Amino acid sequence: RAPAPEREAAKPAPREEGANDGVGAMREFNDDDDDATIGMPSFTPSTSDAAGCLTALEDVSPSLRVLGAMSFVVSTLIGAPQAYKIYARKSSRGVSFWTLALGNVGGFLCVLNLYVLHYDQIKLSGNAFADFKGWARGQPSLLFIWVELANTLSMLIVTPMAYAYVEDSEHAFAVTTPLGGVDWSMKKAVRAGVLLQMVIVACAWAPALIVLHRAGECAPMAWYGNAIGVVVAMIICLKFIPQVKESYENKGSGSLSYLTYGADLCGGLVAFLQKLLVTNERVSTWLPPLILHSLEAYVLGMNAINDKARLGAGAARRDRDADDANEPDEERVQSERLLPRASRGASGATSPRASSPTRADAASWWKSATWL
């Protein structure tokens, strides 16, 4: 037993105000050392109840970094074809505002889910302005956040474009309840929907930002991040159902972009195969996206069949009109007999070749963005 003075010296120093008791402790590493030798930095949670929190930066292979960079570029541009097709056609017919709304809310909630569960990795990455090298070193671990954020912001531009060219029909959204009701035009309903989306996203993000800032780690909000993930999974399963209804009623693609949703479908299938065959992830991580991409494939196939049928019907109608125009009118023939031979046919009907598609028609088809 040590003497009293030595016992006093052996006591731990009193904890300073605001100290974290080891919360957020990181394994030290030197930037000049090899990651394979010392490993990537990690984070020690303050509690064991941190299910889902990612507490260590990952050593991502160069091939996966290239694939991630390509995914980021595609996600950044994925909304552009849809927005351009609406602009080129000056119409948003065939595009479901319900699907756009669910996509916007689901996208921002998905980013929130990733932000919460990757929060420790974000803290480990540090500040880009203070230590850019260390920050860049941690970004491959945050790839999913960047890709989902880019995808969400890219698709966000579609809503104002669709709103600008929507047909402002009356009684587009009418609801009657015992307490009252609403009867809005299409544009008023879209404006109200955008406001509701902003409120939902703000209310979901606010508590997470406040608690994470105060705690400095993911653990206290792990349950919240996982709960948001369940909501996102439900939205993913349901969000394309309104588009199925819209495309069925429209009997064609209208202003819905083949390129945007085709690219989303292809990327989703690649991710599905990777999760199923390579990383062997849980069913809950790949089943909701599989349902979404199956509905996308159904809509694209249905639209392609209907568009092909419309093009065939239009071509048959043009040929029929050309044949009708080429048939001699009895009164025109009788009157032309009274005219000099050189003047005959000057005001006659056009030939079938005159009504056939020209290069100008092809250019118009290209500019109308039908191919998108």
Image: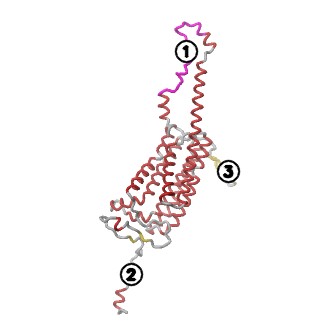
Q: Main secondary structure of the magenta part?
A: loop
- For the magenta stretch, what is the residue range? 335-359
Labels 1 and 2 touching (C-beta < 8 A)? no
Asked if residue 175 is positioned above or below residue 224 in the image, the reply reads: above
Q: CA distance from mark 1 to mark 2?
A: 105 Å
Q: Which residue is mark 3?
A: 176
Residue at (47% x, 73% y) in the render? 47
Q: Is the residue 335 above or below the residue 3 in the image?
A: above
For residue 66, which numbered disc appears in the image? none
Q: Tell me which numbered mark, 3 or 1, is placed earlier along the sequence.
A: 3
Residue under label 1, please give it. 347
Looking at the image, the residue that sits furthest to the front is 277
Question: What amino acid is found at the position of numbered circle 1 in the picture?
Answer: Ser
Give the percent coordinates (x, y) of residue 260. Answer: 49, 45
State the image coordinates of residue 282 (x, y, percent, origin top left): 53, 61
In the rendered image, the residue lying farthest to the right is 178
**Residue on which the image places disc 2:** 14
Side of 163 where 65 appears, left or right: left
Mark closer to the observer (3, 2): 2
Q: Nearer the viewer, residue 34 or 179?
A: 34
Q: Is residue 192 visible?
A: no
The amino acid on which the numbered mark 3 sits, given as a three-letter code, is: Thr
| Mark 3 to mark 2 CA distance (whole Å) | 65 Å
Disc 1 or 2, which lies upstream in sequence?
A: 2
Q: Secondary structure at mark 3?
A: strand
Q: Does the magenta portion include 191?
A: no
Residue type of the residue flagged with mark 2: Pro
